[in-house]
Image: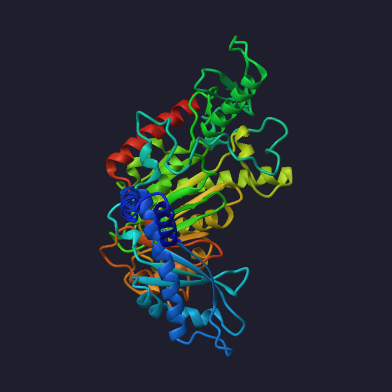
Amino acid sequence: MAGLAVVAGWLLLTTWMPWGAALALVAVVIAVLAAVPALRRCVSRRAMATMTRHRLRQVLVERRCLNFSRAAPLFLWSHPTEVGETVWLLLRAGISPSEVEGEVEWIASGCFARDARVTPTRRMTALVKVDVIRRDPLACELIASELDDWTATTGEAPPRGTGSFRRRRPTGTGRALGTEPVRRSPLRARRSTSTTTSRWSSTTPSGRRRTGPRCRTVAGTGRTMSEPTRLRALLRDWVTAVRTPAVCNEAPAPSVLSIWDPIHLGVDEYGRAVRVTLAYRNALLAGEPGAGKSVGLNCIVGHAALATDCGLWLFDGKLVELGLWRTCAERFVGPDLDDAIDALGALQGEMDRRYELLDTERRRKITPDDAVHGIEPVVVVLDEVAYYSATVGTKTQREAFSVGVRDLVARGRAAGIIVVAATQRPSSDIIPTSLRDLFGYRWAFRCTTDSSSDIVLGAGWATRGHTAADIAPEDKGVGLLLAEGGEPRRIKSAYLSDEQVYALADHATGLRARDAA
C-alpha cells in the first residue's frame, strides 16, 4: 500500500511538472517522513508484521500443516507487538491446534525470531494466536516500579500507568456490617473514618470551577455571551473536564492507592504490565537465595503500606528484609517465635470476631463499605517462613506456628485477612501440599530442581514445560507466576532500591499518621 501510494503520487505530480522534478519531490517527502522516528517505527513494524505473516504461511505449507484437502489455515490478521508480531489463524476443518503447536521451533526459525508461542483461544479452539518473539523485555537489568513516583515529600502524582487519581473506593455488593454503631476493631482502633461523600472539583484553563459528583460547570464568570458562544464554551469545558484528572478537595490527605486495587508486580515476557488483585487472595513466594524473592515481596508490601485502608502486620525472621517497612506497620515481629505465635493468636481472635459479625448480618465476606465501621483488610506478610516453622524453638512451638498460619490462610480470606508468605526453601516440610494449594497466587523464582518448582507451583507443571529450574542464574527477579485458573507465566519483578523503600516507608508512615489523626 505504501509503494502504491508513492507511485500514484509520483504519477499525479508528473501531470503538473517534469518527471525528474516530481521524482525529486517524492524523494524529499519520503526522506522527511522517514526522519520522524514515530512514523518510521510504525511503518517498519507494519512491514515486519506483513513479512511475518507470509513467512508463517510458508512454514506451515512446507511443514505440511494442512488438512486432507491440502488447505492451509486462514490468516486473519497480523499486527506488531512490544516484543515482535502476532498472527491470528483460523484453523480449517481437519487441522488441530496441537499440529500448529508442534511447529513452534520451525516457526521461530522461519520467521528469523528468537522464539514463538502458539495459544488456542478458549472460547473457540479453531482460533489460534501465534506470537513471534524477537525481543526479550525481561533481559533489561531493572524494571521500574509504579511506586517509585511516591516519595517522602511528594505524593500527589498518581502512579504511572493509572491515568488519573482513583475517584473513590470500590463499593461492595452487600451492606456494611452492623446497622448500628459496631465496636471498632482493635486492629484499626486508631482510625477515624468519615462517612461524608466527597465532592470533586477541577479548574478549567479559563478559570471556572467545576464541582459536584458529576463535575458540572458552574456559571459565575460575570460575562455576557451569546448562545452559540456559550455552547462552544460549554463544549470546550466538557472536553477539558474529560481530559483533566479530578482532584479531591475535601479529604485532608487522599491516598490514591487501595488494597482493593490491583498491585503492580512487574512485566511479563510480552512487555505488558502485570497487576494482580490481592483482596480475597493469598500469595506464596519461594525461590533459592538471590533469585529476587525479596524484590517481589517489596512490591506487595509497598502497595499495602501506601494503602491506608488496610492494616499491615510484618513477620521477618531475618529482621532486615521487612525491617525497612517497620515504621508503617501496626505490628512488627522479628526473629522471636513466641512473639510470632502471640501475633498469630491475636489475628485468629480478630478473624473469629469478624466471622461472628458476618454471621449476625447473614453475610459471607467483608466489603470495602465495612471500613466505615473500622473493619478493614489486614495484610499479613511472613518472610522466611522456614525460620519460624523449621529452625528455631521446640517442636511444639513450630507446630503451633504452622497451625496458626494454616488457619489464617484457610479461613482468613472472607474475613479480610490476606496472607503473603515467602521462603527460600521450597521443600515439602516447609510448604506442605495441603497448605500450598490454599494460596491463590504462587510465584516461583529460580529453583535448583524441577521438584522444588513443582512444590511452589503444583505437581505436574514441570512436565508441561513450566519449571523455575530453567531460569538462568543471572536473571534476577524473574519467576513464574501462577494465578487461579491459569497457567504459569514468566514475569520479572519491579525493582525498588533501599533508598526508595526508605522514602516510601516514611511517606506511608506520614499518610497513616494523618489518617489516624
Instruction: Report the front residue among 381 and 287.
Output: 287
Instruction: Report the front residue among 440 and 413.
Output: 440
Estimate the x, y position of residue 205 in percent, counting from the top left: 49, 22
Relative horizontal placement of residue 320, taking residue 510 as reference (left or right): left
Please give the name of the residue rendered at 25% of the width and 63% of the height, measured from the top-left corner.
474
Question: How many numbered discs, if any?
Answer: 0
Please give the name of the residue rendered at 50% of the width and 64% of the height, measured from the top-left corner.
435
Quarter location, residue 178: top right
Residue sticking out furthest to the top: 222
Residue sticking out furthest to the bottom: 68
Colour mode of the rendering: rainbow
Q: Is residue 261 above or below residue 158?
A: below
Instruction: Report the front residue among 91 and 57.
Output: 57
Estimate the x, y position of residue 265 in percent, counting from the top left: 42, 52
Instruction: Report the front residue among 200 and 100.
Output: 100
Relative horizontal placement of residue 499, taking residue 77 as reference (left or right): left
Q: Is residue 84 above or below residue 251?
A: below
Please give the name of the residue rendered at 52% of the width and 81% of the height, measured from the top-left corner.
98
Q: Is residue 28 above or below residue 156?
A: below
Q: Is residue 66 above or below residue 417?
A: below
Estimate the x, y position of residue 273 in percent, counting from the top left: 44, 53
Mark yes or no: residue 422 visible.
no
Residue sticking out furthest to the left: 474
Please give the name of the residue rendered at 64% of the width and 29% of the height, measured from the top-left corner.
214
Relative horizontal placement of residue 65, taking residue 155 as reference (left or right): right
Mark yes or no: residue 379 visible.
yes
Estimate the x, y position of residue 255 in percent, counting from the top left: 48, 33
